[in-house]
Every structure is written in C-alpha cells, then in structure tokens.
Image: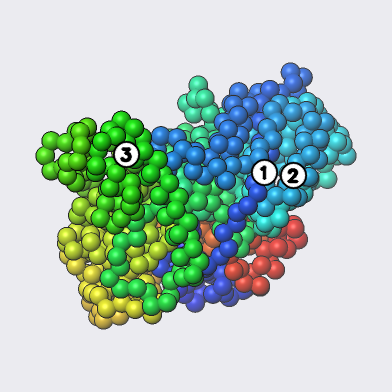
Amino acid sequence: MANRRGSAWLLAGLIPLALPMPAQAQPLSPLDPLEELEIVDGKRVALVIGNGDYANDTAWKDLPNAGSDADRIAAALRNPQFGSTGLMLAAEAGAEQAFDVTLIKNADHATLRQAMKDFAIKAADADVALVYYAGHGFEFDQHNYLVPVDAPAKVPQLLVDDQHIRMADLITASTAKKLSIFFLDACRTSGAVIEMDGPMNGETPQHFGAINVDNSGVIYSAGPSESAYDAVPPNAPASPFAAAVLNMLRYPGIELADFYKYVRRDVKGVTKGLQPQQGPVAATRMDARFYFRPPVSVFQRAEAAVTSDGDAAIDAARQAELDALAAEEEKKIIIAFLDEQLAEMPDNEQLRIWRADPLNPEWVWMLRTLVSEEEIQPAAAGVLGGGGGGGMLFMLPAFDHLDIAVGVLEKTDDEQLILAVLGGSDGFAGTSPQKLLTLSEQGDAVAAYLLGVMHFEGIVMPRDLDQARVHFERSAAADHPAGLYGLARYAEYATRMQLAYDGRGALELYRAAREKGYLKATFRLAEAYADRLIGEADDAERLAVLRDAANVGHARSHYELMIRGEEPAVHFAALNALADEGDTAANLWLCLWSSEQQQFEMRARRCFFAASEGEAMAQQLIALELTKAKGRGISRSDAIYWARIALGTPDLATEWRERLEAVARGEF
C-alpha cells in the first residue's frame, strides 16, 4: 500500500526542528490497520485537454503527443474495459465505472474558458470529477497557469490572467460532490518558460508548481523544476506519463494513492538513464478511497480455518449483501458460457448438470477457470464428469505451476510482482486471478502466496484477512519460504490487533523463513526488532539479524547499527552508497539523520529524493528546512511546493499543519 513505512523509530534529537515529531504525522507501518474509509463512487465526469499544436508566432514548442495522449486517455475513461489482460470475466463488466468525458484538443483561450464553464455544470452534479491536462504550463507569483495554443510569447505582467488559464479557475470548475482528480502533464518544457514585459516584483516564471485542493488527488508528470518528456523514445506514440496512466487503468482494485505510485514507477523505469530522469509526484487530500476499476469480487471464498471473531474489515451484513450480488453476476456469466457450449454440444449431459447448478462448490472453481481462460480441451483421459451424450467433454486444464524462483520472490516488491504476473509484463505471460485461484487449489505454493498477499494488502481484490490466512497457510504447508513469511506477517498482524489466532507464532515463522535464506524475512525481523514489535529475542539475536540484513543492503539495518555505534563510519558510507544507487529507504534515513557529518546541502539532496518518492516525512521536513535555507541557492518556490504536497499527509498533527499551511501561503 502507499507510503506505509513504519516510523516508531524516530529518536529524540533525530530531527532538529522547533516542533516535536507528532505521532499523528508519522506514516503507518505495513502492518498497521487500514482505516475503513468510505469508497467514493457514483456519477463520474472528466475533462480531458490536449494542447500540442501551438501557434507559430508563440515561443511555445509544439508537443506532438499531447493531442494523441488526450485521445487515448479519453477513450480509456469512456470505455472501462481491461483489454486482453484477462483481469475481468466479462467484456461488459465495469460499465458503471465509465466517465462522461469532454475532450478538448488544441484549445485557444476562449475555447478553454467556455469548456471550463460547461464542465463546471457537469462537475457540480457529479460525485467524481477528473481533469487530465497535457500541454504547457508554468508558475508565476505563486499561481499556476495553463497555456492555450494562442498564448503570446510575451505578455505584460498585469495581463497574464487575460492570456493564460489560472489553474485555480480550473479547480473551481472541477469541484464535484465527493472527489476531484487531476492528472497534470504540464511540465513539457525546459529553460525559461515565458518572458515577461515590464517589472516582475522579484518573481520569475517557474515550471508548473503544486496546487492545494481539498478532497482531491493530484499527480504531476514531473517533479519541481523538472521537465516532462513528450515521447520516449523520440518516436513513441505517447508520452511516458500518458503511457503509464493508460497501463494502470487496465487493473481493477488499485486504490488512487497506489495508482499514482505505480504510475511513478513506470515513468521512472521508461526514462531511466536519461538526463534528467522523469519522476511524477503525487499528493492526495482525501478521507476516502477511490478505484478507477472496482476490486475483483468473483472469487470463491475458500473455507477459512479460523474466522476473525467479529473483527472483519467490512460489516458482516454488508459483506453478505455484496457476496450475494457478486454470486448472482457470476452465475449469469457462467450460464452464458455454458449456453454457448450447449449450442455446439446439445446432447452433453455434463454441461446440463453444470448449468443446473453453476455455483456448486464441487465444480464452480473449475468453471471459473474455463470461463476466464476460455480453454476447453478434448477429452482423452481424466475426464471431469461422465458420458451422457456425444460431443466434447471437459477436462480441467493442466496449468503449469508458476515458475517464479525464490530469488525473484524475495527481492521483488510484492505489489510490483503481482501486477506483472496479472498484466503480463516484466517477462510474465499474464495470469488471471481466477487461474491463480485454481493453481492455489491445486497446491501451487507460489500462487497461494501471491493470493495471500492480494487478500492481505487489498491488491486487485477487496482486503480479506480470512482469505489471506487460508492461502498463506497453503503455501506455508508446502514449507515454501515465501509462504512461511506471508503467514508470519498475518500472525504478527493478528497478534497486534488481538484477532483470534492459534497458529504458529510470528517469530517462529520469521525464523523458519530466515533459516531458508529468505531475505524478506530477515528484513522484516530487522524492522520488527528495531521497533520492538516482536519480543522473545535477546540482544545477540537482534544484533545478528541487523548485521545479516545490512550485509545484503538493508538501509534500515545500516542506520540502526550506525546509531548503535557499531562502525558508524562504515555504515554511514554504506547508506550513502545505497542512496546514490537510488534506494529510497537509504535516502529517507539520511534525510532524517542530522549530524555534523551531514551538511545541509547533502541532507537536502536526500530529502528531495525521498520526498519525490512519496515519503511523507521527507516531504514535511524538506518544506520546513527550506524556509531556513535563504542564501543557499534554494528556490523559495521549492519550499512552497513541498509544503503543499506535504499537506496531503493523512492525520497530519495540528501544529505541523499550521506551519506547513503558512509555508504553502509563502509566509516565511
């Protein structure tokens, strides 16, 4: 899940700020309970703008992909299908998630103004309003502006608003009943963005800055003072940002904050090696959840060994209602599939038996697989069911187990791996969730582990702790190290949240996975020991785990050993080496650690990196630190930018919010 790094580690004197580090401002650990927030849904409207064909007499360069990006984004929002990824059972599923889209391309100032007026009427009557803007933009005098295609090269300062579109006006026009979403690909330029006629009151036009909007989610295609690429490679049909957004729109069950995180990952991957590398920055200010596509809910609920004794994440009555609706929809899908087969094989008695009771637990899981994979094989041996007429009989597809090595599992982020397996990227052929369920039923320990993570974290499907335990236990029963690690995570969570659980303890399971050399178990033990979340270990074992984790590049362990005084220079150097390689955690720890060894400029560089990666604590710190950096070549607008981003931190403490709001207003 997004930005849930534990921070019980904050030590006295670690942060040299006037304010104490409030508990409310600390990010959640991966095992903290997710708040049961409202899921925003309902009527959806979108305004998609693509400005790329700028007038010849302006200083603004043409953006060949801006218009085509807008076309593709508009089509994806209007037609919420998942293409050929196999992530949905029926082509018509998800139609209620479609947006009513207004598409504007190569708009001049008057056209944009009229489009905003028309969209304001739509947005006021909608639950969710989305704006996607591809084109030029800039910041001046603490205001953000969009650039129409007829914008002049020079404009008097007092007439800036007459020739450009204030982002604040578009925000007002995009106010919906529940949520406003902004995708701002407005940084596709470099150098001076506009030349002003007349005095500028000390202000210089900057790249597009951060906006400050309540009940919103915002993602910027690039970080502060960075340019966004129109195409990578140069002849690509879409910008890296648009391509990443389109890719993530294929997936169900991705919450908005996570959606932004994956978009950033994809863009950074495509632009790796370029100077500069492009890295989108996101900020959310919302007390709710939003999914472009709802979580998958057509899975068989495997029989749980132990329930959570009334502590289910969703109210039982509501869950029963949702399950009934999902079952009815699934029944229709399966019957339609069976009717197609009966049209070809009308005398097949087995088909008729299945159609009479399509959700029978004895065969529904198999029918799900057949529907999802559309793979029917002639009967030869091992036929499911018996004769009863001519024609083809069905046999269960003999799926190969997932060929994912332990070395890949232990070194790859679980969320990234799951999306790659489902979406057919990073060398994977593409596997449907239904196929994963079949493989888990057939004893595939890797499939069972991945399903456990999906249920535990709420990736693609609703969070379901009982189902997470079932699949983790299947994987652990095969003595697979990932399964042992997954079940340990569940056991740790159950213990902390006082859920009914009488299985093997978290420490025993972590140790068992670690004995098999599973790195994630070693890393989690190191984190838990450092935060004193797991007992029953003496100092010698704690130190051994930290050393082992540090030896394989675990940033937190290097930090813990450094502050314990164990070869601090060695571990400080190791942290800097990891940070230079792009390790987010290493950059965060160096950002948070203040000492005479770290000059402000070095520390600020680490904070900038961690803040750009979405680390809320770094965002807050860099905003406040920059207010004290006068005369050090630091832009005033950078402090304002990061303060506005940081204000999106959930449950931000009052004293921090007040200081950040002052910075966001430029009052420093």
Asked whether the residues under the numbered discs 1 and 2 touch, taking CB atoms below 8 Å apart as contact, a structural biologist would say yes
Residue of label 1 = 45
Residue 63 vertical position relative to residue 166 in the rendered view, above or below: above
Tell me the tag on residue 657. none
Tell me the tag on residue 122. 2
Q: Residue at x 59, y 42 (%)?
A: 98
Q: Position of residue 570 (x, y in %)?
A: 32, 61
What secondary structure is marked by label 1?
A: strand
- Depth order, front residue of 123/147: 123
Looking at the rendered image, the disc whose residue lies closer to the viewer, 1 or 3, is 3
**56 sits to left or right of 458:** right
Residue of label 3 = 373
Other-residue count near label 3 (Cα within 10 Å), few / some / many at <14 / 14–19 / ≥20: some
Counting residues from the N terminus, which is met first, the one under dot 1 or under dot 2? 1
Separation (CA) of disc 2 from disc 3: 40 Å
- Depth order, front residue of 323/116: 323
